[in-house]
Image (cartoon, rainbow, N blue to C red):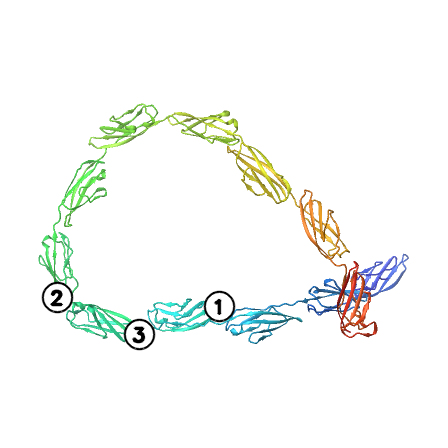
């Protein structure tokens, strides 16, 4: 046997009785040795006769068969008229089976093969699923339906300038109809209007089709007129003038022209214009609307004339001056002595000296003017003679005269020369006198004379005070001139008449030269010799002694001695003694000696008188308990300390570590200094105890956020305090402070107090912040039926153990509950808030609010079309629903005539007239009226339309 028939995809189950062995065979090469084999995921190819051969315990064999049928799954073919416009009908179609069951958005269901949904809304968009049944097998198919509420928009890329292209835009549709100013129409999605004019400005409207739907939108287009610039210039110009370009007032300007000219000014200028600046200049302007237009102006720059000017200069007195000019069309001359002429090449007869000078001609061509000039010399030959004397004997006489054609010099001692600037070397006083020169200038001559003076040299007289001892002054004396220059050994020089070398040395010995200059600036030299004797060699020694000892001074190297030193000390002894020396006697002692040459020298001896030691002591007193005591001493080279609690040290600045109150007291130091002397001093040290602290606080345990106030008491009293609140906050707000904690946890709080003695102690405390629960709940059903379905609320709060629940149901009045998972029945449909407040085991609270939507206690669905044509598909019209206890339906035609009445929702209208089975109503739209009573006793009345199509 088998459990069929089957649908494709089912499992075929074959069965036979209990025997010893089994051998199955069948379609698709099936075989099995099982008693009851199965074939999973069967297909139609598994249909057919299956044979089983069995053997019993006796070895006897027999076969039998069973016929298996595997029906194919139906192949649904599903369609719709999607997309549809809002308020139109959705037409669903399906084929491929004998039974159909539809489901879809908004709770839709139907058992009609090709149902229709009238007055479709956007909530009816989505996927519709149909389950198709054939031969007892079922399969599903889907179709996606879009209910369109078409909208559209219109835009443009303006504003525009006249002459540009208007671009209209639409985001996209099926078809487009644009209309606008000047009878504009277009069926393009985003049409363009080239060469825009101001008449094209205005509103443009587009009507679009989206499927069978339409939408309309409008956009406003602005077309601004182009600016109307006028370009001008103030030319024509001459080279070197300034070109001035002009145009009207606009927003921006762009000029271009010859020689790469450019400018963004309204009225630019080109200074120092040249001929290359001639040509067409273009200006492009834009107005406030960004519209642009260009215009031009022609500029002419004429070149300046190039005067060529000449004369017959130089000319002699009373001869004619001839002026020449070329390079223009008219000429205007001006010159010395008020001269003027409009002749191109004028002559000036009988020239006088006053007519010598610069002559200027103004030349004109093409309206442009330029000038040229020529210098004219009128000669009345004269000359001069000069020399650069007076001279000193032995120098060179230099004679000079201005340039001419030829020269003839004559003078004392038969002097003659033809040079322009003649010379006479190695002058003597006999060469003094007048020198005459005769010069030729053109055909003229001139004579001049210069007087030459040659002075005799001065005779120097000089001496000095040598010999001298080293270190003494050398005094020089000179005479015989008006200025003096001395030079001598070791780089000596002076311009004094009688100079002095204040401190001589052995290098000062030698010859000194005196150069004298007299009143005539004539120079001569003389020599004088200097001897310098060396200083005697001095040996001087001192001593180092203690205070009150004798200090011995010693010297040698001279014939007489003179000592001086600190405290007004003096002595003429060679080796004096300072008795009972005191530290004030320490210092340098100077001895002054004189040798046999009466030369002197000095030496220095050092006396050191070591004073008794005077120690200087200090400490970091006072100190705090456990702090180090730092002792300081100075005034010696070796130190020995003693003090309280058996303290001793040989350090200069010892440290007493971790000071205690037992270490308070007087510390003594003995200091040794140079010379074996010593001294003692003491310093008092106080070790203060640390402050004693008490920390008080407000509640230090609670729910987040927890704010705690702290207070510290200190003995001795505090002078400063530093708080660390354990949450990253620090402070120094005083003995009372506080902090708030928003995060769960245990916090360590500390306060460091410094008392009036500068000693510090710290104290710690803790605060514990309990976690806050997170309130939450769920409920079922999600959309309960009013006054029918009780809502069960489930607490799903988390985060910490929950100790209590407070529920608030706001449904007309406020209802409360303290159970963890309460139930509540909503009497009426609506949206109601529910509040849950939960409390943790530490008393921390949290609140959550949600809403529950209670829906009406019934539902009804009415089709909008049916086809009573006897084909077994959609032949009847009726409603389906739930929660209905009474039902009454009436059908009317468009004239209000009653066609059908029933009180049973399961009694459909077959489309006939008043129950006559032989009279089916014509294809038309009919009105239905349904009155129902719900399970809660509420009466609902509904009306609508249904389309009958045979």
- In the figure, 415 relative to 295: above or below? above
- In the figure, 645 relative to 390: above or below? above
- In the figure, 204 relative to 775: above or below? below
In the image, taking residue 749 as reference, residue 419 lies left or right, namely left
Tell me whether circle 1 and circle 3 mark residues in contact (CB < 8 Å).
Answer: no
Pick the residue in front: 34 or 551: 551
Residue 479 is situated, as x and y percent measured from the top left of the image, at 14, 43
The quarter of the picture where residue 826 lies is bottom right
Label 2: which residue?
445
Sequence-wise first label, 1 or 3:
1
Label 1 – label 3 distance at C-alpha:
43 Å
Q: Residues within 10 Å of mark 1 (few under 14, many from 20)?
A: some
Provide the secondary structure element on which disc 2 rests.
strand
Residue 417 is situated, as x and y percent measured from the top left of the image, at 12, 61
The quarter of the picture where residue 538 lies is top left
Residue 474 is situated, as x and y percent measured from the top left of the image, at 20, 38
Residue 72 image label:
none
- Identify the image quadrant of the N terminus: bottom right
x 19%, y 70%: residue = 313
Label 3: which residue?
367
Label 1: which residue?
290
Q: Residues within 10 Å of mark 3 (few under 14, many from 20)?
A: some
Provide the secondary structure element on which disc 3 rests.
loop
> Is residue 196 visible to the viewer in this orientation of the structure?
no
The quarter of the picture where residue 230 lies is bottom left
Pick the residue in front: 791 or 313: 791
Circle nearer the viewer, 3 or 2: 3
């Amino acid at each position: 046997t088998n459990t069929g028939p089957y649908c494709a995809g089912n499992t075929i189950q074959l069965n036979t009785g209990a025997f010893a062995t089994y051998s199955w065979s069948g379609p698709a090469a099936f075989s099995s040795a099982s008693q009851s084999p199965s074939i999973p995921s069967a297909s139609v190819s598994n249909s057919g006769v299956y044979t089983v051969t069995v053997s019993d315990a006796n070895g006897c064999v027999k076969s039998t068969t069973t016929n298996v049928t595997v029906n194919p799954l139906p192949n649904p073919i599903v369609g719709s008229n999607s997309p549809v416009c809002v308020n139109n009908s959705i037409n669903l179609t399906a084929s491929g089976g004998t039974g159909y069951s539809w489901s879809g958005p908004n709770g839709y269901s139907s058992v009609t093969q090709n149902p229709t949904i009238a007055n479709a809304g956007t909530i009816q968009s989505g996927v519709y699923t149909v389950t198709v049944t054939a031969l007892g097998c079922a399969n599903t198919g889907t179709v996606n339906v879009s209910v369109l509420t078409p909208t559209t928009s219109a835009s443009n890329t303006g504003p525009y300038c006249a002459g540009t292209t208007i671009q209209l835009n639409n985001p996209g549709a099926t078809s487009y109809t644009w209309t606008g100013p000047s009878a504009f129409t277009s069926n393009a999605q985003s049409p363009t209007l080239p060469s825009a004019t101001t008449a094209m400005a205005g509103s443009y409207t587009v009507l679009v089709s989206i499927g069978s739907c339409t939408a309309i939108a409008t956009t406003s287009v602005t077309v601004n007129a182009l600016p109307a610039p006028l370009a001008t210039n103030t030319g024509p110009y001459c080279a070197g003038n300034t070109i001035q370009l002009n145009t009207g007032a606009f927003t921006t300007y762009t000029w271009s022209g010859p020689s790469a000219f450019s400018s963004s000014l309204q009225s630019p200028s080109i200074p120092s214009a040249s001929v290359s600046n001639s040509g067409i200049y273009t200006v492009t302007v834009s107005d406030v609307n960004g519209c642009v237009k260009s215009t031009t102006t022609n500029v002419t720059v004429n070149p300046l004339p190039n005067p060529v000017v000449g004369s017959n200069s130089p000319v002699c007195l009373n001869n004619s001056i001839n002026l020449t000019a070329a390079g223009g069309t008219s000429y205007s001359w001006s010159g010395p002595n008020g001269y003027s002429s409009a002749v191109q090449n004028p002559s000036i007869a009988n020239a006088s000296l006053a007519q010598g000078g610069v002559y200027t001609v103004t030349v004109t061509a093409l309206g442009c003017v330029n000038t040229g000039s020529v210098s004219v010399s009128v000669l009345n030959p004269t000359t001069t003679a000069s020399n650069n004397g007076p001279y000193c004997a032995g120098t060179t006489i230099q004679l000079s005269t201005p340039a001419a054609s030829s020269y003839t010099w004559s003078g004392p001692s038969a002097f003659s020369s033809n040079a322009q600037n003649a010379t006479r070397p190695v002058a003597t006083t006999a060469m003094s006198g007048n020198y005459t020169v005769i010069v030729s200038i053109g055909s003229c001559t001139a004579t001049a004379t210069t007087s030459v003076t040659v002075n005799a040299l001065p005779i120097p007289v000089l001496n000095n005070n040598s010999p001298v001892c080293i270190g003494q002054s050398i005094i020089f004396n000179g005479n015989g001139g008006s200025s003096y220059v001395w030079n001598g050994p070791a780089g000596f020089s002076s311009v004094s008449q009688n100079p002095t070398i204040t401190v001589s040395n052995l290098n000062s010995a030698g010859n000194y030269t005196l150069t004298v200059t007299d009143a005539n600036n004539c120079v001569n030299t003389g020599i004088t010799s200097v001897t310098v004797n060396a200083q005697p060699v001095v040996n001087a020694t001192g001593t180092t002694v203690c205070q009150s000892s004798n200090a011995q001074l010693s010297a040698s190297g001279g014939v007489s001695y003179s000592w001086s030193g600190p405290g007004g000390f003096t002595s003429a002894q060679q080796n004096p003694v300072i008795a009972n020396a005191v530290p004030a006697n320490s210092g340098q002692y100077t001895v002054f000696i004189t040798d046999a040459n009466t030369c002197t020298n000095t030496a220095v001896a050092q006396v050191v008188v070591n004073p008794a030691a005077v120690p200087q002591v200090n400490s970091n007193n006072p100190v705090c308990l456990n702090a180090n005591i730092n002792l300081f001493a100075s005034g010696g080279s070796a130190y020995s300390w003693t003090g309280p609690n058996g303290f001793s040290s040989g350090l200069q600045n010892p440290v007493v570590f971790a000071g205690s109150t037992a270490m308070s007291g007087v510390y003594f130091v003995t200091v040794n200094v140079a010379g074996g002397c010593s001294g003692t001093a003491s310093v008092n040290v106080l070790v203060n105890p640390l402050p004693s602290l008490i920390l008080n606080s407000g509640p230090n345990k609670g729910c987040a956020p927890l704010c705690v106030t702290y207070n510290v008491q200190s003995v001795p009293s505090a002078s400063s305090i530093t708080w660390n609140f354990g949450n990253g906050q620090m402070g120094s707000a005083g003995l009372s402070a506080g902090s708030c904690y928003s995060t769960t946890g245990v916090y360590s709080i500390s306060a460091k107090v410094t008392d009036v003695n500068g000693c510090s102690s710290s104290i710690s405390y803790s605060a514990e912040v309990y976690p806050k629960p997170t309130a939450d709940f769920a409920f079922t059903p999600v959309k309960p039926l009013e006054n029918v379905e009780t809502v069960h609320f489930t607490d799903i709060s988390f985060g910490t153990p929950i100790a209590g629940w407070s529920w608030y149901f706001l449904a007309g009045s406020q209802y409360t509950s303290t159970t963890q998972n309460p139930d509540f029945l909503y009497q009426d449909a609506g949206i109601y808030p529910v509040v849950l407040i939960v409390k943790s085991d530490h008393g921390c609270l949290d609140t959550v609010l949600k809403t529950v939507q209670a829906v009406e206690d019934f539902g009804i669905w009415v089709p909008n079309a049916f086809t009573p044509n006897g084909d077994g598909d959609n032949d009847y019209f009726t409603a389906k629903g739930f929660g209905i206890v009474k039902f009454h339906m009436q059908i009317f035609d468009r004239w209000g005539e009653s066609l059908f009445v029933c009180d049973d929702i399961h009694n459909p209208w077959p489309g006939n007239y008043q129950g006559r089975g032989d009279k089916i109503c014509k294809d038309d739209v009919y009105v239905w009226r349904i009155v129902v009573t719900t399970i809660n006793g509420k009466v609902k009345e509904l009306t609508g339309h249904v389309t009958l199509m045979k």
